[in-house]
Image (spheres, coloured by chain):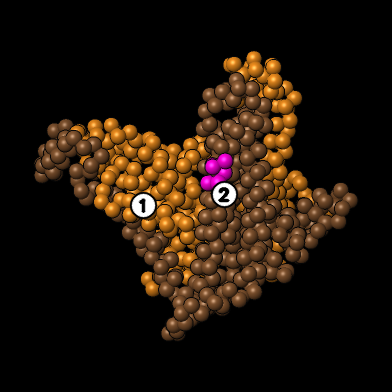
Chain colours: A brown, B orange
Amino acid sequence: MGQLATQPVGPRAAGEATRATRARRPSRRRAPGLLAPYGFIAPFYLLFLAFGAFPPLYGLYISLFRWNGLNKPQFVGLQNYANVFTDPVFWHALTNALLVAVFVAVPGLALALVLAFLLDWYAPRFRNVYLTCLFAPQVVATPAAAVVFQNIFSKSYGVLDQAIMALGLPGPDWLGSPVPMRVALALLLLWRWLGYNTVVYFGGLQAIQGELYEAAMVDGARPPQVLRLVTLPQMRRVILFTTVLSTVGLLQLFTEPYLLVGAQGGQGAAMLTPLMYVYDTAFQTFNFGYASAISYVLATVAVLGVGINLFVARRREAI
Amino acid sequence: MRAATLSAARAPAAGRVGRKHGWQGGLVHFVLVLVSALVIFPMYWMFIASTQTNSRLYRAPAALLPGAQLFANLHQLFNTVPAGLAFANSLLISGTVAIGGTFFCALAGFSFARFTFKGKNVLFMLLLATLTLPGVVSLVPWYEMMAYFGWINQYQALIVPNLASAIGIFYMRQYIASAIPHELLDAARVDGSSYFGFFGRIVLPLIRPAVGTVGIILFLSSWGDLLQPLIILNSQNHYTLPLMLGLLVSQYGTGLSLLMVGATITTVPVLVVFVVMSKQFIRGLTSGAIK
């Protein structure tokens, strides 16, 4: 596959030689072989266009119809979207997602930041061991984790309830009533993502140059001030990255709630996530058009969420 | 370090160079050990539970030490569901996605990082735009397309669409941009090598950490995916491990120990690989995370 040869021979060599001659032109970044760049991106891009760019557009198209996948689609314009806004189940699912997002992301990211800070500032021995342990949940397949936690959360027999009852308190029915269910899901998500966010923050902290800290110390800053005036501003981009990731990711929760309490979201549908609702609408009720409309409303919410994150980040910068 | 003199005067913590922090160091260790233990516990529990009998698991106090039932449970698992097949299916699908996807992302990332060509910015913006859209919106269309191709219940449906990962290409582009200096490419041009040769011989070895990171990310997201197989696969012989677990969960009267051992075979192989390669993997993540 190509040669780094200095003395190529044969017809291929003619092409090589020509290319080499052309390459000696001054402009460094111009690709002389016009086709080469496209060749490199072709496999990826063809797949991307087919499966990454086209489906959302097709989905938008589908959302304007009433269709069950078999019969002829019926054009209904924006009727599906109107229905979404008056659909109580949708709002319920969305509320669930937002609750999860706030109650998982905020404490989770804060805790991750604290842990990352401890690992960075104090640089304890076995640092890599801690990071590996914290990150390990990411490597556990989501369904396996859900199954394990389903057991841990099980009433009276689960390890968690046993530990709680050993302290003399009543063991909640984690997967049976709405409020404990949400807490249980939050704990599961926290378990899963704490390590990831800690590693990301750790990377960000490590990238902060030591001189900044030294300068601050020389200026007489105390640790809380150092944290506020040096660390946090430097970490802004990384924090933004994790909040955006969390926002979008938590809106697409499916596997854990599905395996923990079933497709309906459990008692009071407390664990019904928007994606579960889309899945149910599309593949249990076979209402493709409506499902597409829901997914687009969801997407809008996600984009809004990202927009809000960016806006807040920008305002902080101004201060 | 200067910090030492200053710390004597005011701030308790000395710089980040791992100096002795006295009692604070101990507290830090304590916190880290506590959190790590809490995080590790569910995995430990999963393993313990797969070595116990069903009846033992339904008795309090909870079993915290390994039992002797591992092989018996495994045996029962393989008799109840096509577990070996599910494992093989998962491996095939996730492996292909990981290898193929990483390769394509590296190729494309290289092009975006080091070439200038017409339409480059447009194409890149398009990529960015789809990243802001949650995957939800592609779900129904994806299904329709799979039906159209005749890929329902086929492995291709789970492999091909997942080969073009936007995150993968971003990571690759950024890594290659920082790892392969312009001079290297110019030298190769002057030498008369083909771009593909340059890519294969020089770039690929240099971006090994990125290849590892992206490969693992792609592998993991495919391995643990429930939604796509749930929608597409309908014959048990084609089931992947997540689906097999789902089957166990929904079957009435599945013993807990069976469930746990199923979860274990889904987890342990990947976990082992991860622990072995953790240092490189974390390094790859922390260096690539800063955008």
Dot 2: within a 10 Å radius of its alpha carbon, few (fewer than 14), some, or many (20 or more) residues? few
Discs 1, 2 touching: Cβ within 8 Å? no
Instruction: Say what secondary structure mark 2 lies in.
Output: helix
Please identify the residue farthest to the front as the structure is shown: A319
A318 in magenta: yes
Query: Viewer-proximal residue, B259 or A314?
Result: A314
> Which amino acid type is marked by label 1?
Phe
Residue that carries the numbered disc 1 in the rendered image: B124
Image coordinates of residue A86 in percent, x first then y, are 60, 76
Q: Chain of mark 2?
A: A
Q: Tell me the amino acid under the disc marked 2.
A: Val
Indicate the position of residue B281 as horizontal and vertical percent values: 51, 39
Tell me the residue that label 2 is attached to: A312
- Point 33% across, 54% down: residue: B122
Q: Residue furthest right?
A: A168
Asked if A38 appears above or below B192 in the picture, the reply is below
Q: Evaluate whether residue A276 shows in this view.
A: yes
Q: Residue placed at 13% from the left, 33% from the top? A: A7
Furthest residue in direction top, as rendered = B5
At 75% across and 45% down in the image, what residue appears? B65
The residue positioned 70% from the left and 23% from the top of the image is B12
Where residue B129 appears, x then y in whole percent?
42, 57
In three-dimensional space, the C-alpha distance between marks 1 and 2, rounded to whole angstroms, equals 26 Å
Instruction: Return the chain for callout 1.
Output: B
Which of label 1 and label 2 is nearer to you? 2
In this picture, which residue range is highlighted in magenta? A312-319
Residue A139 in view, yes or no: no
Secondary structure mostly taken by the magenta-highlighted segment of the chain: helix
Please say whether residue A48 is one of the residues in the magenta stretch.
no
